[in-house]
Amino acid sequence: MATYEFAAGNNLYYEVVEPRDADGVTFVCFNALSGSIDTWKDTILDTLHASGHGSLVFNFRGQANSPYTSADVLMPDAVSADAVQLIHHVAPAKPVYIGLSIGGLFALQAHWRGAPALGLVMLNTLRKPGVRLDWINAGVTRAAEVGGPALMMDVMAPMLFDEQWLAANQATALNPDNYAPMDQDIGAYGLLRNGAHADWDVPWEQVDVPVAVVTGQRDRVFYTESDVADIVARIPSAVRTDVADAGHMVPLERPDTVADACLALAAAI
């Protein structure tokens, strides 16, 4: 574990594992806005490491153990710019980027903006801009403002997770005692609110590396089949894996499927 310091009070927390094998890649993992490195450590990293590959996981400024002093660094463009600096600092061997949700967009931006990767794994990333996406972003932020993360999760969970996860977590959900407005001065709120400023008008035809697209088809929030199919067709070199029994948080729900997609991409590079 380590920290990369931009300036006093501005750090990225990260952890690195070097590839064991000479032909191993380094999977660089980009969180979702409300995520952390646990998204990867608790799910797929053991499998990737056992296959001889390395990893770089990190938390954005505003996430756990990654402090900041100005809210400007919580904007989407700043998140991807931070990633470029960290990747230059660490210099991972044969980097392959993995991104969950908007993390896939950050990964692509980092690739294009100075930290090139050999390939990309996009987990429930593909979406198109428009009124529906704007409404989702605003609605999630409003739920957090009113009732904090607990209300946000209670409202969104049936549309984000599969039946198995919902059954396992239903007993502790929908408890009004857990609701309290989110502190609007903390990083988690700033990242959530500023996610609405992400630029999803992506020139997908210009993606110049192989891409593995993993889609949890029970994602009722961001997954629109016609949009995903259109975007995949625009990417010059894309392989699609559909997961019928997973939702948006596919690494948590079906880690073996995600690990398999990562390993297949690494083998093809």
Image (tube, helix red, strand yellow):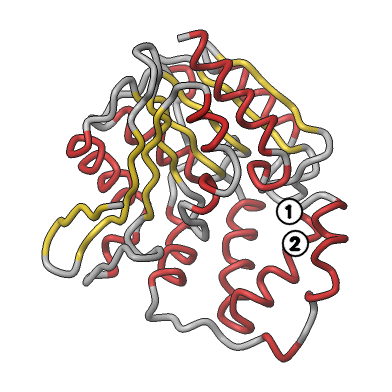
Residue 137 as seen in the image, left or right of residue 162: left
Pick whichever, 250 or 22, lies toward us: 22
Secondary structure beneath label 2? helix
- Taking depth in this image into account, of 190 and 23 the one nearest to the observer is 23
Q: Position of residue 17 (x, y in %)?
A: 36, 36
| Label 1 residue SS | helix
**What is the quadrant of the C terminus in the image?**
top left
Number of marks present in the image shown? 2
Which residue is at 38% across, 80% downward?
185
**Amino acid type assigned to the residue bearing label 1 in the image:** Leu
Q: Which mark is residue 157?
A: 2
Q: Which residue is mark 1?
A: 160
- In this rendering, is residue 83 above or below 5? above
In this picture, residue 223 sits left or right of residue 40: right
Tell me the CA gap for discs 2 and 1: 5 Å
Callout 2 touching callout 1 (CB < 8 Å): yes
Badge 1 local density, few (<14 within 10 Å), some, or many (20+)? many
Farthest-out residue, top: 268
Name the residue rendered at 78%, 75% in the picture. 173
Q: Is residue 13 left or right of residue 103?
A: left
Residue 15: x %, y % from top left? 34, 47
Whole-percent x and y of residue 75?
34, 58
